[in-house]
Amino acid sequence: MDSGRFRTPRHISINDRSDLAPALTDAETMVLRLGRSPGERGTQFVLVRAPSGLSAFFLDEETEFDNPTKSWDMRPSGADIEWLDQARRDILDGYRLLPTFSEASLVNLALSAGIVSDALDLDPDSIGAAPATVSTTFDFEFVPDESIDTVLSHNAGHVEIDAIAVTRRDGQRVLLIIEAKTGATGAVPKHKLAYPVFALSNEAAQFDEVIPVFLRADYDGKAITYDIHQCSPPRTSTGEHCLTALTVTSHRRYHLQVAEESHNDSR
C-alpha cells in the first residue's frame, strides 16, 4: 500500500456510522482510537466486534419514549418569554444578534433557554449559561463490551468535550457531560460521549451523579429542533468502564423560536 495515499485518521476517527469503512461495516466490526503507541509517534487503534452486532457501538437516536414534543416561543413577542427572568431575557437578546448559530452557540442557547434543565428535570435555576469545554489528551481504561474480557488502554489520546456543567437535581450535585451534534439525525458512535465520561471519571467521583447527555440541534431557518438524550453511565454491572453500556434512557424533543427574523442556516 502507498502510505502517502493512506490517511489513517480518516479511517479510525469515526464521527458517524457512515464514516466507517465499508469492509468494517460488512464485517460488523468497529474501529476505536486508543491514543498514542507507547514510545512511538503513531496512533493506536483496535478492531472489535460485539455479540449484539455493530449497532451496539452507536447511540440509538430513534429510541421512543412517551414524551410529547414541546414548542417554546421565546421571540421578543413570544408566548413563553414571560416566564424567563430579566437576566435570561438579556442573554437571549445576544443570540438574536448572531447571523448564524455555531455548534457551541446552540449548546449554550439550550442551556440559557432552560431546555436542558427541563429535559433532565434539573432543579430550577441550577445551571448556568456558559459550560466548560476542553480539548486535550487523557489516559483511561475500558472494556469495549461486557462480554469481552480484554481491557483496552487509551494512552495520551485526544478527547474533545463539548460541554461540562455542574448543576443540581433533587438537591444532589450533578455533573453533566454533553456531546453535541448539529443537523439531521445520524448515527453517533458511543465513544464520542463515553470517552469524555471515562476521561473525567476520577474528577467525577466528587459528584452525587454523572449524567452523560447527547444533544442534537437542527436549525431550519425559523426554529431550532433540539433532541436531548439522557444516557446511562457507561459501566458494567461490576463498575468497570464499558463502551457499549452507554444507552439512551430518556429522549425529549423541543422546537425553539428565539428570533423574529430568520438566521442563516448554520450547516
Image (cartoon, grey):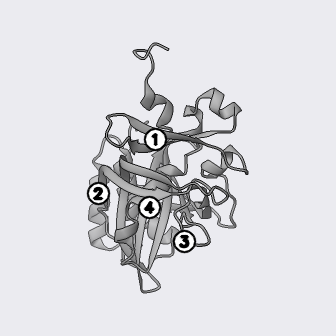
Element type at marker 1? Answer: loop
Other-residue count near label 2 (Cα within 10 Å), few / some / many at <14 / 14–19 / ≥20: some
> How far apart, in angstroms, are the residues tagged by discs 2 and 4?
33 Å
Mark positioned earlier in the residue sequence (2 or 4): 2
Q: Which residue is mark 1?
A: 221
Q: Which residue is mark 3?
A: 239
Mark positioned earlier in the residue sequence (1 or 4): 4
Mark positioned earlier in the residue sequence (2 or 3): 2
Question: Closer to the camera, 151 or 146?
Answer: 151
Q: Mark 3 or 1, which is nearer the eye?
A: 3
Q: Mark 2 or 4, which is nearer the eye?
A: 4
Q: Residue at x 46, y 41 (%)?
A: 221
Q: Residue at x 70, y 34 (%)?
A: 27
The quadrant in which residue 125 appears is bottom left
The answer to whether residue 70 shows anywhere in this view is: yes
> How far apart, in angstroms, are the residues tagged by discs 2 and 1?
17 Å
Amino acid type indicated by mark 1: Gly
